[in-house]
Amino acid sequence: MDLPISSRDFRCLQLACVALGLVAGSIIIGVSVSKAAAAVGGIFIGAAAVGLLILAYPFLKARFNLDHILPTIGSLRIHPQPGPDHGEGRSSANGNKEGARSSLSTVSRTLEKLKPGGRGAGEG
């Protein structure tokens, strides 16, 4: 049983579903006592937001001409900046490794001192 539906009716149905999702999610979050129930309300609101994006996509695409913007966004690259020199005459990668080792050994020594019967237990 195929019923013809106009584009306007379809958009109204989409908008009604988005509104229903927002209202249901808000009610669930409002009356929830547990965090799990609030999470379910958040899922409803998130689904409504996705529905709203789907509904608004054709308008946004025509308004902002996304065909020219999206390829530009896809070609963006992040170029990391070199970190500050530590002034010790070695590379920053080597300095980071040695710094991690020294802090790890410091933590190990501190834990040994805190152990009962450890080598530094009697020291003050």
Image (cartoon, rainbow, N blue to C red):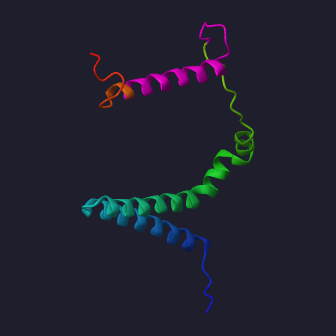
Read off the magenta span. Answer: 85-111
In this view, the residue in front, 119 or 70, is: 119
In this view, the residue in front, 103 or 3, is: 103
Q: How many marks?
A: 0
Q: Quadrant of the C terminus?
A: top left
Seen at 59% across and 20% down, the residue is 98
Q: Quadrant of residue 20?
A: bottom left
Q: Quadrant of residue 21?
A: bottom left
Across and down, in percent, residue 17 comes to 47, 69
Direction from residue 79 to residue 22 in the image, left or right = left
Based on the picture, tell me whether residue 74 belongs to the magenta stretch: no
Q: Quadrant of residue 90?
A: top right
Q: Quadrant of the N terminus?
A: bottom right
In this rendering, the answer to whether 65 lies above or below 41 is above
Seen at 46% across and 65% down, the residue is 18
Across and down, in percent, residue 32 comes to 27, 62
In this view, the residue in front, 18 or 35, is: 35
Across and down, in percent, residue 39 comes to 37, 60
Seen at 60% across and 14% down, the residue is 84
Q: Main secondary structure of the magenta part?
A: helix
In this view, the residue in front, 91 or 26, is: 91
Based on the picture, tell me whether residue 107 belongs to the magenta stretch: yes
Across and down, in percent, residue 100 comes to 54, 24
